[in-house]
Amino acid sequence: MQKEMELGIKPAAYDKKGPLYDKVEVYEKIVKHIVVEDYFKRMTKSMNNDIETAIELTQDANKRFSSVLDAFTKTHTSFSDSAKKASSSVRVAADTMAAGLAKIEKTANFDRLERMVDLLERAAMAMNTLAEMEKSGQLAKLSEAIKK
């Protein structure tokens, strides 16, 4: 029924699958439509509708993709900025610590410090020895011997 309306052809017969058309009549109609360019105009109109739909779908997909890409770019920029700040902070802290250690090393005379540690160790050993002598009573005897 729809083909009748499109081409203006009536079915020659019907079978269980539907209408049957006369091949010669169909060819004549098609040739007439092609000659007057009506056929191509109808096809073009149909294709234009399809093209418009495709363009709309593509533009919608492009907008959605652009939105996601913009969000991704913002996230990337944020991460990059955070990484730069963290790197800068670490560099500044390392430079400050190095300067502080250099100042301590310059201020603290390590040779003198080493001599002082040796003296403190010897004094501690002497104090331990005196404490043991006091426990055993030898310190009192030594003290008496020195007084005489």
Image (cartoon, rainbow, N blue to C red):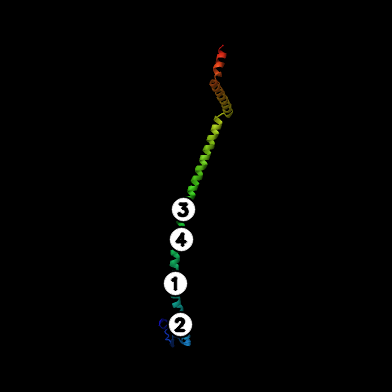
Report the amino acid beneath label 3.
Thr
Q: CA distance from mark 2 to mark 1?
A: 22 Å
Q: Where 113 falls versus 48 (above or below)? A: above
Residue that numbered label 3 is attached to: 75
Instruction: Judge by depth and name the residue closer to the eye, 103 or 53.
Output: 103
Residue at mark 2 to residue at mark 3: CA–CA distance: 59 Å
Q: Nearer the viewer, residue 60 or 100?
A: 100
Q: Position of residue 115 (x, y in %)?
A: 58, 26
State which mark lies toward you, 2 or 1. Answer: 1
Q: Amino acid at mark 2?
A: His
Question: Looking at the image, do the residues carrying marks 2 and 1 touch, with CB atoms under 8 Å apart?
Answer: no
Q: Residues within 10 Å of mark 3 (few under 14, many from 20)?
A: few
Number of residues whose C-alpha sits closer than 10 Å to that of mark 4, classed few (under 14), some (14–19) or many (20 or more): few
Q: Residue furthest front?
A: 136
Q: Secondary structure at mark 4?
A: helix
> Which residue has dot 2 on it?
33
**Distance Cα–Cα, label 4 vs label 2:** 43 Å
Amino acid under disc 1: Asp
Q: CA distance from mark 3 to mark 4?
A: 15 Å
| Label 3 or label 4, whichever comes before in sequence order | 4
Mark 2 and mark 1 lie on one chain; the one further toward the N terminus is: 2
Q: Is residue 13 above or below residue 125?
A: below
Q: Earlier in the sequence, mark 4 or mark 1?
A: 1
Residue under pointer 4: 65
